[in-house]
Every structure is written in structure tokens, then in C-alpha cells.
């Protein structure tokens, strides 16, 4: 009986004709508006060429020179430390954590866990973390998430500096565009309170989805910013369509998308498959789970992620720690669950959005999700700059506790690739351009 029911679930291929009719119909306003925004930036090939040039290290450093020249010294220092092998190799790190046992263990890279930190709002925090990593012989994250106002960081020079730093250290990073709900788009809510008001709308109503598209294309062509956060079904679809046309966009699904069960995940991944390119690629590269999911949900979803041939493309990004205030009930720490999951589900990142609870509760200013949406000058004027810097370093420490726990279980981790080679055999060949 069950087999007969399964047969009823099959979708006739002819149903695709109705979808294609919508996509190619000249009078379909939704698609026409999408193409009109795209055409302002050129053909997909022209857009990718602009982005490639803008993303070059030389171009980014020139932007830093123009907006924040003092950051060049920090970037040169970071490059020098990488070249001189100041950061611990993975082999030495394992030796430090588990001793000579590291030489006899076989670490399975198929299940390597990406070390992820969020949110890295300001360039000086990267330098502070790097100094701590050198001093402690700990690991720099392999993935960074930003949730800062794009226009603010473009103006003060942090945007190109962070993008350059990511190239130097060999880490991926994701930015959050300003068209995300805290811009007053939902007239019934205001500011960052939108985060707590999703039943009133996710924050990209009416024409805001097209504004998100326009904003993405601006930062992609001007700064080479490829990976962005995505939190609305409409902008997810626009990302699929943009990639289908040939623009090399990449995005990760936000925790605020609310994927909290296997069927929500299946719906998201089915869309990725439906609009994938002929080579099987999709712009969906990260999938941030809701904080409420359990291991079983992730294990079930891993089955059809593999069946859809997305196991290597779509990373499951799972919150291990969260900000102390503003988002979840504390204490929240999923490290023990990760230890069970990491040995059977590949391509997971361990996302650290807060310090360990026992550390957070002792801070004069514990981490707060609403700090992400404050103006930098207001943070400095209030005297909170050092507090927020400490919050970030607490997340860094929590990430390294996870790295240590994984290593103790014989599990691989993915840290910043240019800083932490498997073994220290030769110097990096990357060079930072200097300016007189």
C-alpha cells in the first residue's frame, strides 16, 4: 500500500511546462521587473567580469588605501604572519590537544566541520582574533558572517578591508544586505524589532525583494561580494533565477528563514534543484537551521541533500552557541549534540554566535543580537566598543572550545586555510601590495 501511495507522489514532467510558461512569458510583470533590474548592470557575463576585477586583492587594497589607509598596516602584518608561519598548523594543533595520539589517529576529512563565527562586524576584530590565535596557538575560523550596515562599512572602509583579510587568511565570508527588514520596510514595525515581529511579515514586502536584488548587484560588481545572507522566499527565488541566468551569486539561508523540520528543508532544496544550472550547481551554498532543530532532523535532511547531489555544495550551518540576549532562551549550547552529528553527517559548519553561557553570564555587557543593528559611532560614544570587542573574542574562544572537542574525538575541522595548513612545509605565496 505504501509503495502505491509513493507512486501517487510523482510529478508528471509536463507540469514543468506551466512553470516555464511563466518564466518566458513577455507580459509576466514579476519576471520582467526582475530582468529590468539585472539589465542595469549589464549581461551576466559583464556582471561577473566586473565582480572578478573588483574582488581582486589589488583592487580591494586600493579601496582600503582610499578609505582607511591605516588598515593597510594591519593587512600587511596579517600577511607577514601568514608568510612566516606564525599560526599553528593543523598537525601541530592536534599534537597540542591530544599529544602523540594525534600521530596514530586517522582524521576523516569527509566529515570535517567548518569553524564558523558570527557576527564579525568590524575589521579590527579580525586583527584582534589573529593576535589571540598566534598567542594561544589556536585556530582562526574558516567562515565569517557579517550582519552590519553595508553603507556604513562601505563608507568607513571596513568592507574592502574585511574582504581583503578573508583572501589573505583563506576563509569564506557572508555579508547581510541592508534590505533585510530593519530598514522600515514593514510599516507596522520599526527598526531591529522586525526580528521579533516576523508574524507581521519577514521584512522584505512589496518591492523590497527587487531592492535586495539591486543592492546585491551593486556590491557584487563594485566589491566582488559574492556570498550574502538570504531570509525571504522571494529573494531566495530571485537568487535562484539570477544564478540560472549566469550570474555567479552565492547565498546562505538565514536562521530567520525558519527551516525547522525536514519538509521545510526539502522545499528549499527542491527549489535549488529545480533552478540549478545544467552543470548541477546552485547558488545555495549554506543552509542555516532554526535553533529548534534536533539532530534527527539534520540526519533525515542529509539523506535527500545527498540524493539531490547537494552534499558537497550545500553546507548545513548549525548554531552551537547564540548571543546571550535577544534571540534564544539561555543557556544555549549545542556542542555535545554536534559531537554526535559530526561523525555521521558531512559538510556541517559549527556556528558560534555567542560565548559559552558560563562566560556570557559573567560579562558586564553580554552579547546581544540587537547590537548588530547599532550605528558604529553610537557604540563608540556609549562606551560599548570594548564590550562588543570582548563579546566577539568570547565567540572566538567558544569556537576554539568546539575545535578542541572535535579534535579530541578524532574529527577534522576546517579553519582559515592559508593560516593553518595541515603541516608547516612552505611559506604562503600570497603577497600584499604595499603603498608609499
Image (cartoon, helix red, strand yellow):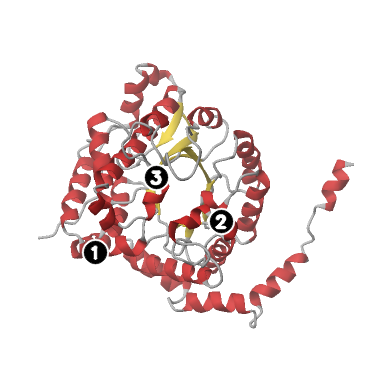
Q: Residue 63, labelled with which disc?
A: 1
Q: Residue furthest top?
A: 100
Query: Element type at marker 1?
Result: helix
| Vertical comparison of 388 with 175: above or below | above
- Are circles 1 and 2 on residues that touch, CB within 8 Å? no
Query: Element type at marker 3?
Result: loop
At label 3, counting other C-alpha atoms closer than 10 Å, the crowd grade (few under 14, some 14-19, many 20 or more) is some
Q: Residue 368, labelled with which disc?
A: 3
Image quadrant in which the N terminus is located: top right
Chain-order first, disc 3 or disc 2: 2
Q: Residue furthest right?
A: 1
Q: Residue furthest left?
A: 436
Chain-order first, disc 1 or disc 3: 1
| Vertical comparison of 396 with 17: above or below | above
Q: Picture coordinates of residue 14 (x, y %)?
A: 78, 66
Image quadrant in which the C terminus is located: bottom left
Chain-order first, disc 1 or disc 2: 1
Q: Picture coordinates of residue 99 (x, y %)?
A: 34, 17
Identify the residue at horizontal 48%, vertical 61% (top origin).
181
**Nearer the observer, 128 or 355:** 355
Query: Element type at marker 2?
Result: helix
Identify the residue at horizontal 24%, vertical 34% (top origin).
134
Using the numbered discs, state the Cα–Cα distance from disc 3 to disc 2 in whole angstroms. 19 Å
Residue under pointer 2:
198
Amino acid at each position: 500500500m505504501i509503495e502505491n501511495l509513493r507512486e501517487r507522489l510523482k510529478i508528471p514532467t509536463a507540469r514543468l511546462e506551466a512553470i516555464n510558461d511563466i518564466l518566458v512569458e513577455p507580459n509576466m510583470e514579476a519576471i520582467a521587473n526582475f530582468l529590468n533590474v539585472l539589465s542595469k548592470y549589464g549581461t551576466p557575463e559583464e556582471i561577473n567580469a566586473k565582480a572578478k576585477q573588483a574582488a581582486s586583492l589589488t583592487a580591494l587594497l586600493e579601496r582600503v588605501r582610499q578609505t582607511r589607509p591605516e588598515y593597510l598596516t594591519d593587512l600587511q602584518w596579517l600577511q607577514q604572519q601568514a608568510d612566516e608561519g606564525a599560526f599553528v598548523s593543523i598537525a601541530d594543533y592536534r599534537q597540542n590537544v591530544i599529544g602523540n595520539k594525534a600521530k596514530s589517529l586517522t582524521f576523516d576529512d569527509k566529515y570535517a566541520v567548518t569553524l564558523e563565527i558570527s557576527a564579525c562586524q568590524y575589521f579590527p576584530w579580525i586583527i584582534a582574533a589573529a593576535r589571540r590565535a598566534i598567542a594561544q596557538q589556536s585556530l582562526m575560523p574558516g567562515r565569517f558572517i557579517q550582519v552590519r550596515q553595508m553603507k556604513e562599512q562601505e563608507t568607513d572602509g571596513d568592507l574592502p578591508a574585511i574582504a581583503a583579510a578573508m583572501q589573505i587568511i583563506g576563509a569564506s565570508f557572508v555579508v547581510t544586505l541592508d534590505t533585510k527588514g530593519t530598514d522600515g520596510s514593514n510599516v507596522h514595525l520599526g527598526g531591529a524589532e522586525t526580528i521579533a515581529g516576523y508574524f507581521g511579515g519577514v521584512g522584505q514586502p512589496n518591492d523590497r525583494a527587487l531592492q535586495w536584488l539591486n543592492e546585491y548587484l551593486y556590491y557584487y560588481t563594485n566589491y566582488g561580494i559574492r556570498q550574502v545572507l538570504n531570509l525571504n522566499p522571494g529573494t531566495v527565488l530571485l537568487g535562484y533565477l539570477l544564478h540560472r541566468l549566469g550570474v555567479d551569486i552565492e547565498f546562505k539561508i538565514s536562521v530567520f528563514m525558519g527551516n525547522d523540520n525536514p519538509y521545510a528543508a526539502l522545499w528549499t532544496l527542491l527549489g535549488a534543484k529545480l533552478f540549478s544550472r545544467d552543470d548541477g550547481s546552485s547558488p545555495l551554498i549554506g543552509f542555516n537551521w532554526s535553533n529548534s532543530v534536533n539532530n534527527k532532523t539534520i540526519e533525515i535532511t542529509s539523506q535527500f541533500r545527498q540524493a539531490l547531489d547537494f552534499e558537497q555544495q550545500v553546507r548545513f550551518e548549525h548554531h552551537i552557541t547564540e548571543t546571550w540576549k535577544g534571540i534564544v532562551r539561555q543557556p544555549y549550547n549545542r556542542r555535545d549534540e554536534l559531537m554526535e552529528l559530526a561523525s555521521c553527517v558531512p559538510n556541517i559548519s559549527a556556528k558560534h554566535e555567542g560565548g559559552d553561557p558560563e562566560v556570557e553570564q559573567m560579562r558586564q555587557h553580554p552579547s546581544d543580537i540587537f547590537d548588530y543593528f547599532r550605528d558604529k559611532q553610537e557604540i563608540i560614544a556609549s562606551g560599548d566598543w570594548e564590550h562588543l570587542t570582548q563579546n566577539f573574542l568570547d565567540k572566538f574562544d567558544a569556537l576554539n572550545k568546539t575545535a578542541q572537542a572535535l579534535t579530541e574525538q578524532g574529527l577534522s575541522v576546517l579553519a582559515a586555510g592559508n593560516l593553518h595548513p595541515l603541516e608547516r612545509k612552505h611559506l604562503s605565496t600570497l603577497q600584499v601590495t604595499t603603498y608609499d
